[in-house]
Image (spheres, grey):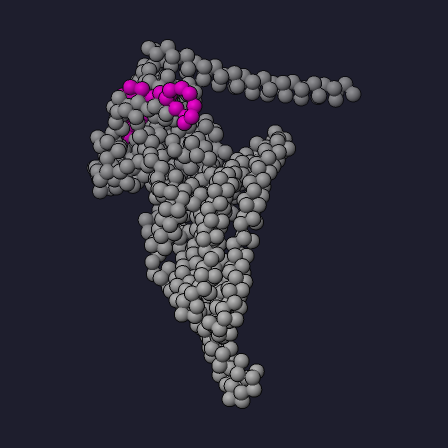
Amino acid sequence: MALTGSRVRRSIALMWRGMRSHPGIYVLAVGASGLFGALTVGVSRAVGWATDSVVVPAIAGDEAARDRVWLGGLVLAAVAVSLALAVAARRIWAGYGVVRIQADHRTALTRQYLRLPASWHRGHPAGQLLNHTTSDTEAATGVFNPLPFALGVVVMIGVSVALLLTIDPWLTLAALAVIPVTVAVNAVYQRHMSPAVTRAQRLRGDVADVAHESFEAALLVKALGTEDREESRFGGRTQELRAANVRVGIVRSLFDPVIQTLPSIGTLLVLGVGTWRISTGDVAPGDLVTAAYLLTMMTVPVQAFGWVLGELPRALVGYERIAQVADATGALAHGDARLPQTPGQAGMSVRLADVGVDLPAISGARGRSITLLDGVDVEIEPGATVAVVGTTGAGKTTLVSLLARLSDPTRGQVLLDGVDARTLADGEIPAQVALVTQSTFIFEDTVRGNVTLADPGAPGAPSDSEVWDALRLARLDETVRDLAGGLDAPLGERGANLSGGQRQRLAIARALVRAPRLLVLDDATSAVDPRVEQEILRGLADRADDGAGAEPDTDPRPGTTVLMVAYRMSSVALADRVIHVEGGRVADTGTHDELMARDPGYRALATAYEVETERREKERADEAAAGALDDELDELEEVAR
């Protein structure tokens, strides 16, 4: 999508690509504009004819000429109506073209955002990405509003030059004298405008990014009382944007008057040369009126060139910023392999074969890449429940995210049912693998909409019974029944009317309703009460056991393999196996009891969790005892009174 070559070449390529994307619309728009140009020349010729055949003879006393006044008016009126229709057609089709191109850019950006991996998104702020679909898209398409008008002017200029040559070569030279001046002025304008527009577009993205962060952190800002800091931070960016926009306005304010004045200067030049040619008898008054009127009528159309030239720097900057995203590498390639569909199989088998993940060094920063995972070799049996345990930064999230293919490993293979994840067809993994993260997103929609992520009645959408089954497994069905409206109950923005634990359980139900063969829980129950968490995990285990032993025709959706990042030892103890990750490597794997016996790191980690749990329970017990003692003292004081 990127443009190459000089600024002139890139400008021409930008305009050509836009029109080529919707050829039918732009054929109509440019055709209507060309018709307008030809009719404009016809009006000028009609005015010249009326001057020589009607006006001058009528003033001289010719009665026949006076009788033809109505004919001259009728001719001018007919041409004027044709002009109005051509203008309306040009504007309508040009407007269609602009909105179609904008839709193309926004669709391409959205598809690219969805294709690019999470690692790419981590390096690109959401505010900047939003700015690409709004301000940059509008900038990139602004040139297409006046473009059909300007191309129609080419027809007008061609016909006008031919007409002026038939009148007098000197008048033609006078009329065309402003063209090289216009080219020179535009060259100076482009040199000053491009850097100013580039800076303004970048700052628009910065302002959007700061605003997005402030809105996202609204609760934090209010809780910590940092409103003044956020206001100052946002104000600083907006002042920079204001200064950049003022700079753009200054450059444009110097350019636009020059472009708008040049046609008038050309008209004055034609009048001066025409007066001289009339005095020598080489040109008739009607010819001079034709030429002068033609240039006067061309003043606004010729300014369309100025509008195009004025929009081009901004359009190039906006388009190139869009192209940087559209051409970004890193999108995960898909193959054509399919996951095997084995009836009655209890979940999916998983194998990480000598997997390593390296995080590249930040562009422009010193240092080498960071190794997040190295030499990870793990095999998970179908239908097993496996816990991943490790200290903060050990690589747990990186490990489990590979299974949902949010990114690919730098080294090694991720095998799902024996098939390399990189060779699977697009859509295979989301259809059978569900990932639930610690941070959940709730749409401003109903409960049903948030669980199914589909419109009611849409093809393939889960039924209400399936939704209730998923809510029951997530231990959220009773909460939803208590809501006014049940599944149709509206949830506030980001689930504001739900607690943190309820939001996490809703996210789990959203995953379970898809009947995944592999469920990945990345600390997805951190805000859930421990008792409820164990109920959810036991429910998943029971479902897996039932699926593993069911007949294929009686249970078309067998049990699920569960891989969970866990911190609570009560939850870890429910897992069939535990994977201890330390420093990006698998330190050990086995049952909880086996690791407690032979893995000192795991034992220290588990003991720390238990000590912390006991400390919190002791604190709660002490608080309860202190409260009871206070109550007894209050009673004794009351008796003493």
Q: Quadrant of the N terminus?
A: top left
Please state which of residues 95 and 504 is positioned toward the viewer in this rendering: 95
Instruction: Tell whether 157 sits left or right of 424.
Output: right
Please state which of residues 248 and 607 is positioned toward the viewer in this rendering: 248
Instruction: Tell whether 538 sits left or right of 422.
Output: right
Determine the residue located farthest toward the right in the rendered image. 641
Q: Quadrant of the C terminus?
A: top right
Q: How many marks?
A: 0
Residue 359, located in which quarter of the rendered image? top left
Q: Specify whether residue 607 is in view.
A: yes
Q: Indicate whether 614 appears above or below 165.
A: above
Please state which of residues 55 and 142 is positioned toward the viewer in this rendering: 55
Give, as a single range, the part of the protein colored magenta.
361-387
Residue 50 x %, y %: 49, 78
Residue 237 in magenta?
A: no
Residue 72 x %, y %: 49, 81
Q: Indicate whether 56 appears above or below 191.
A: below
Determine the residue located farthest toward the front in the rendered image. 280
Q: Residue at x 60, y 38 (%)?
A: 239
Instruction: Tell whether 313 sits left or right of 22.
Output: right
Q: Residue at x 52, y 54 (%)?
A: 259
Q: Residue at x 26, y 24 (%)?
A: 412
Q: Residue at x 48, y 73 (%)?
A: 281
Residue 610 x %, y %: 45, 16
Residue 484 x %, y %: 51, 47
Residue 379 in magenta?
A: yes
Q: Specify whether residue 481 is in view.
A: no
